[in-house]
């Protein structure tokens, strides 16, 4: 099953590159589209796009290393990493799809009124909360409830948590 971990990591990296490439394609269409980039590093701190690309690739490299390193601190930590990498892969592909839509339909965005800094921050915050944190919270909560309660129950047959059949545990 090591290939599953490798596949998830390859998809994660591919999604990151797709996000960067489609972002560049979209913002290179027109300066009014470039002004719509909602990343807080660009909006709030004025970081140029090339620096954002470099920062993103460094962060992707760090996450890939921490996810794929041979020894994880615990099974729970590894589970959290799998969850994070899985959801971030989905989010990055979704963002890349949105960027590509903007690239393909640039004429609709060029003359549209510019968004304020607050509107862009609110849109970015909403994206992160709704597409990253809530799904991760919804996945972690049942797992933690199961993990905390599974040992306190009695089972006729149990295969998990020990690898052997245990009767009447």
Image (spheres, helix red, strand yellow):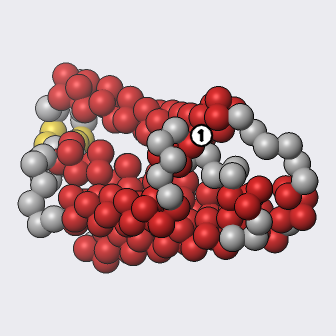
The quadrant of the rendering that contains the N terminus is: bottom left
From the image, tell me which residue sits under label 1.
Answer: 124
Mark 1, secondary structure of its residue? helix
Q: Is residue 10 left or right of residue 79?
A: right
Left or right of residue 69: residue 46: right
Identify the residue shown where x is 21% and y is 58%: 66
Choose top left, top right, bottom left or bottom right for residue 99. Answer: bottom right
Does residue 9 appear anywhere in the picture? yes
Dividing the picture into quarters, in which one does residue 33 lie? bottom right
Which quadrant holds residue 80? top left
Vertically, is 36 above or below 24?
Answer: above
Q: Position of residue 158 (x, y in %)?
A: 22, 42
Percent x, y of residue 62:
26, 60
Q: Where is 42 relative to 8, above or below?
A: above
Q: Residues within 10 Å of mark 1 (few under 14, many from 20)?
A: some
Residue 57 as seen in the image, left or right of residue 105:
left
- Residue at image point 12% right, 66% down: 70
- Residue 104 lies, in percent from the top left, at 81, 71
Q: Nearer the viewer, residue 8 or 34?
A: 34
For the image shown, how many numbered marks are present on the structure? 1
- Where's the C terminus, which quadrant? top left
Quick check: 129 left or right of 62? right
Q: Nearer the viewer, residue 148 or 39?
A: 39
Closer to us: 61 or 39: 39
Using the image as rendered, state which of residue 74 and residue 56 is in the foreground.
56
Asked if residue 130 is positioned above or below residue 70 in the image, the reply reads above
Visible residue check, residue 123: no
């Amino acid at each position: 099953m090591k290939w599953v971990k490798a596949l998830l990591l390859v998809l994660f990296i591919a999604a990151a590159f797709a996000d960067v490439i489609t972002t560049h394609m979209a913002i290179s269409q027109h300066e009014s589209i470039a002004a719509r980039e909602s990343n807080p590093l660009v909006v709030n701190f004025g970081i140029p796009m090339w620096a954002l690309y470099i920062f993103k690739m460094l962060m992707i490299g760090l996450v890939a290393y921490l996810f794929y390193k041979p020894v994880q601190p615990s099974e729970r930590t590894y589970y959290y990493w799998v969850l994070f990498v899985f959801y971030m892969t989905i989010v990055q592909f979704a963002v890349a799809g949105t960027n590509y839509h903007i690239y393909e339909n640039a004429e609709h965005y060029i003359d549209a009124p510019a968004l304020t800094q607050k509107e862009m921050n609110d849109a970015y915050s909403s994206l992160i909360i709704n597409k990253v944190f809530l799904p991760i919270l919804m996945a972690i909560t049942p797992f933690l409830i199961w993990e905390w309660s599974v040992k306190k129950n009695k089972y006729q047959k149990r295969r998990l948590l020990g690898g052997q059949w245990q009767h009447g545990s």
